[in-house]
Amino acid sequence: MRVDPVSGRVLATRRLGSAFGQALIAAGKLWVITYSFTGPRRENYSVLRLDPHSLAVRSRTILPGTSGRNTVGSLAVAGHWLWVGAATLDRVSLASGRVDRIVRLHYRGPVQVAADPAGRVLLASLGLDHPTYIARLNPRTGAVQARTTVRWSAIEPSIEGIVAGGAWIANSGGMTTTSWRIDLQTLKTTPTQVPAIPGSRVFASAIDGILWVTKPDRGHEITYCADPVTGRLRARLPLLRDASLLTADATNFYYSDVSLKTGSIVLKRASIDPKCAS
């Protein structure tokens, strides 16, 4: 759905035919990756190029499947290309929506990709078995430039945003999810103040230059905006226990909440505290 960010009114809808993975706007189009799991070792992926206003489909590209691990797929724009991470790493033309190159990274399992807002840095989360890796890739060719090892993970580590010379990574070791920051040049961990709580899931996501720290099942107790380099708390968010942060723009953040009257999920927005950007 395309939703008016002020009124919440639905402006356009598009039935995808399979599950939604991720979306982003680039080169004047809305790019969406969809997926379906048709067997224990089989996934089907498609990249759709949509008109961002009407949501009309301009092209649909089917990607290779069979990663051996169910993954929803990811999108990033870097080096003037659309990079798609799924069962493989694919380079897609922003003009035609067609796959231009399939990059062989020589790691088992799915690939997750992320890029900085300027499209100069391309990162990937790689690997299926222990250990897994975070790699910096050439933004034009996809070749590995450097990598760092994530020594223990129950699932593939997730890249939760690139900002201010670093990237925020989330990783699950089973019962606990932790978030930390790495330097883009060295790929080494940098000191931060994001808490690591045993038996909890703590996510730190960088959106538009602000770090948002959330713990899905504790609401306002540990949901706040923070310094994107240090992780230092700047301001807490006025969310109730059942609310979940979804995304943010330059002035507002958007979250889902449960209606006390109907029990349905409601999309809400609130102004960003000026402290979040200070």
Image (spheres, rainbow, N blue to C red):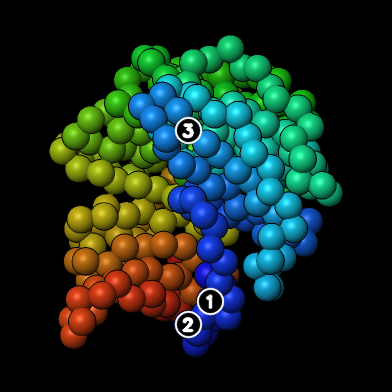
* Amino acid type of the residue tagged 3 in the rendering: Glu
Contact between labelled residues 1 and 2, with CB atoms less than 8 Å apart? yes
Which quadrant of the figure has residue 145? top right
**Residue 94: which disc?**
none
Count neighbours of disc 3 (C-alpha within 10 A) and say few if under 14, some if 14 to 19, many if 20 or more.
many
Q: Residue at x 32, y 20 (%)?
A: 152
Find disc 2 in the rendering and name its residue: 8
Element class at badge 1: strand
Question: Residue 230, position in %: x, y?
Answer: 44, 45
| Residue drawn at the location 68% of the way across and 66% of the way down | 56
Whole-angstrom CA distance, mark 3 to mark 2, is: 34 Å
Does 105 sit above or below residue 265? above
Which residue bears the numbered disc 3?
43
| Coordinates of residue 273 in the picture (x, y in percent) | 43, 74
Q: Measured from the top left, where is residue 13 in percent x and y?
A: 55, 72
Of helix, strand and loop, which one carries label 3?
Answer: strand
- The residue nearer to you, when weighing 105 against 209, is 105
Report, in whole angstroms, how far the alpha carbon at label 2 lies from the one at label 1.
6 Å
Q: Is residue 44 above or below residue 246?
A: above
Camera-side residue: 174 or 1? Answer: 1
Whichever of callouts 3 and 2 sits on the residue coming sooner in the sequence is: 2
Does residue 171 appear to the left or right of 78 in the view shown?
A: left
Which residue type carries mark 2? Gly
**Tag 3 near tag 2, CB within 8 Å:** no
Q: Amino acid at mark 1?
A: Val
Q: Of label 2 and label 1, which has the lower sequence position?
A: 1
- Which residue is pictured at 58% across the width and 80% down the height? 11
Q: Which residue is labeled 1 in the image?
A: 3
- Pick the front one: 196 or 157: 157
Q: Are there few (<14), some (14-19), or many (20+) residues within 10 Å of tag 2?
A: few
